[in-house]
Amino acid sequence: MTIQQAIAHPGCGCDGQSMLKNLISIDEALDRIALHAAPEGGSEVLPLGQAAGRVLAQPVRAQGMAPPFDNAAMDGYAVSTSALRGEGPWVLDVVARVPAGQEATGSLAGPSAARIFTGAPVPEGADAVVMQEEVTRQGDVIHLRRRPAPGQNIRRAGSDMAAGTVVVDAGRRLGPREIAACAAAGAGHVQVRKRLRVALLVTGDEVREAGASRSTAQIWDINTPMLTAALAVAGLDLVAASHGADDRAGLVRQLGEMASHADLIVTTGGVSVGEEDHVKPAFADLGGTILFGGVALKPGKPVAFGRIGSSFWLGLPGNPLGAFVTWQVFGTALSRALSGETATAPTRRLVVTTAPIHRKAGRCELRLATVAGVDSQGRETVTFEDATHSGRVGRLPLADGLMFLPADAEALPAGSFVEFQPFCQT
């Protein structure tokens, strides 16, 4: 389902034509991020064991065949199928023993067998391995009742990787699967992009550290620990985290300092149009370029993206759920692009709603959703809240992702297809 452009709708002013006309769609915002964001910083070479979570700067090629030789897929006996005359059963002399890690010496000739263990080289002349449970051994003789097929239980040299082939391409983030392939390719060291340096600035005189004492007009700071965790999960290097000054001149100083040593500045709050919203004016004072400012979505409409000198800026709304949602949609895509990942935009898939939805049209709504299972037709289903509240995060631990409600949809019956972006994407 394509997220549609916002449309005019009568009602409160926040979703009226005058407010929506300068907003862009979610997909247009992602396109602008993809257009302007390019990998920052250089690269470095790391031991493979220290490279988890990093993005490859150069492809990894297999240094040789994998496996490097024909080897046994299980414990048993290596035999030559052409030496098994008649219909059987066959009686074969055990003439060798080949443990894993040792070279196979000699070769099989005639009706004979070699005791072999998983991963050991198959001796010359053998073309099958019979699992030990299928033979009866008496002393140095085995009795074989069923004829094995040529190639049975043998892992052929190069069957996993051919020498010189690319096994993990540049731009891929290294997780356990990629690390396994790199190790099999013989890559003890890999060239990766340097970690993206991020500075976090959370505004709002009313916020205090979680758990600290507060007045009746103050709230605990959700955005700092929440976004610090999000940056850590994304493998980014948090070089500074500050509470923003609540005046324009102070923000100019803070943003200027952050721009001098961070590749990406993330701010929360102060990006709307109120008289206490100083982040955009401070950004302008520093000569920053706004690449978009305002997206037709709920929550998170004021989200902004721009550049100050060589640093990029992502301005998230101050409401915690709005900050979380806009980081998931835009922050994830931006940090991936700046880190050099090939796949930047988080993937979405279609799911089916389990209840009817009634809402105000005008902006695409991103609503928390939980995967419930599958329906009678095998389609993935989700459950969800009746509405989206930008300041509430208590239900976040129960949600699996975000469902996208199209901008022009006022009502969706139960059983409707909607797009769904999961939180966990590896």
Image: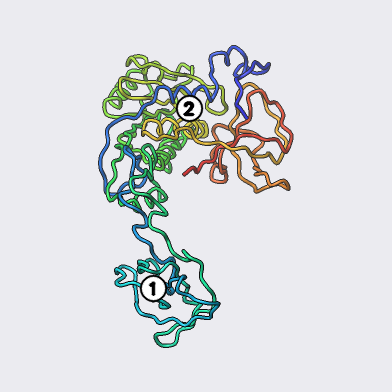
Distance (Cα) linking label 2 and label 1: 65 Å
Answer yes or no: is residue 213 visible. no
- In the image, taking residue 380 as reference, residue 204 lies left or right, namely left
- In the image, taking residue 79 as reference, residue 11 lies left or right, namely right
The residue where tag 1 is placed is 116
Badge 2 or badge 1: first in the primary sequence: 1
Circle 2 crowding by C-alpha within 10 Å: few under 14, some 14–19, many from 20: many
- Extreme top residue here? 18
User: Measured along the vertical axis of the image, is residue 170 above or below residue 51?
Assistant: above
The label on residue 134 is none
Frontmost residue, 70 versus 402: 70
The residue where tag 2 is placed is 317
Which amino acid type is shown beneath numbered disc 1?
A: Ile
User: Measured along the vertical axis of the image, is residue 77 above or below residue 381?
Assistant: below
Residue 65: x %, y % from top left: 34, 53
Q: Where's the N terminus, which quadrant?
A: top right
- In the image, taking residue 219 as reference, residue 96 lies left or right, namely left
- Extreme bottom residue here? 139
Secondary structure at numbered mark 2 = loop
Residue 404: x %, y % from top left: 60, 32
- Which one is closest to the eye, mark 2 or mark 1? 1
Which amino acid type is shown beneath numbered disc 2?
A: Pro
Q: Are marks 2 and 1 in contact (CB under 8 Å)?
A: no
